[in-house]
Amino acid sequence: MPIGLALWSGRPRDKAKAESGVLVVERWILAALRHRTFFSVGELNEAIAELLVRLNNRTFRKLPGNRRQRFEELDRPALGPLCRPNATSLPNGRRPAPTSITTSSLSVITIVFPMS
C-alpha cells in the first residue's frame, strides 16, 4: 500500500501549470532523442543532461528570461535543507526494506517498500 502525502491544504491551484511544464520538458527531450541509439544508461543520462541545460537556458516565448533565471530568482531562495531519512519514519519505528526492484529500458528504477 503506497503512502500518500498531501501537498496542498485545500484545492491545488498550481497543479495544472506544473503538469504542463513536465509535459513540455518530456516532449522536448524525447523529440530530440527519438532518432538516436544509446548503448549504455550513462550515455543516455549524459544526453538528457545536455538537453536539460539547453532547455533551461532557452528564453521563454511570452515572458522575459528563461527557466534557469526563474529558478534562481524565485525557487532557490525558498528552498530549505532536505530532511534526513531516519529509522523512525514508519509507524512501527523501523526503516523500510526494499522488496522488489524493477528496471525499464529508460533507466527508471522502482523500489517497492512494504507498509507492515
Image (cartoon, rainbow, N blue to C red):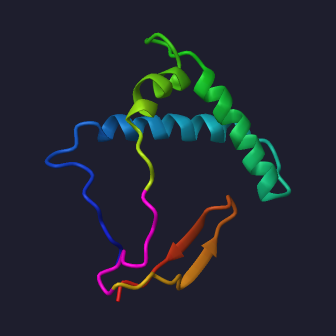
Identify the main secondary structure in magenta: loop
Position in image of residue 81 (x %, y %) = 44, 48
Q: Is residue 86 magenta?
A: yes
Going by the image, does 65 lie left or right of 106? left
Task: Specify start and end residues of the magenta stretch as a single range.
Answer: 83-92
The quarter holding residue 58 reads: top right
**The one of 94 and 3 positioned closer to us in this rendering:** 94
Q: Is residue 34 visible?
A: no
Is 47 situated left or right of 52 in this image? right
Q: Quadrant of the N terminus?
A: bottom left
- The residue nearer to you, when weighing 5 against 94, is 94
Give me the residue at 67% from left, 61% from top. Answer: 107
Q: Which residue is pictured at 40% across the width and 26% down the height?
A: 74
Q: Is residue 72 magenta?
A: no
Q: Can you say whether 116 is above or below 82 in the image?
A: below
* Horizontal side, residue 89 vs residue 70: left or right: left
Q: Position of residue 87 (x, y in %)?
A: 42, 78
43 versus 57 height, above or below: below
On the image, the x and y values in percent for residue 47 come to 76, 41
Q: Quadrant of the C terminus?
A: bottom left
- Above or below 14: residue 3: below
The residue drawn where x is 66% and y is 31% is 53
Question: Measured from the top left, where is residue 89 in percent x and y?
Answer: 36, 74
Q: Nearer the viewer, residue 33 or 4?
A: 4
Residue at x 56% of width, y 15% of height: 59
Residue at the right extreme of this rendering? 39
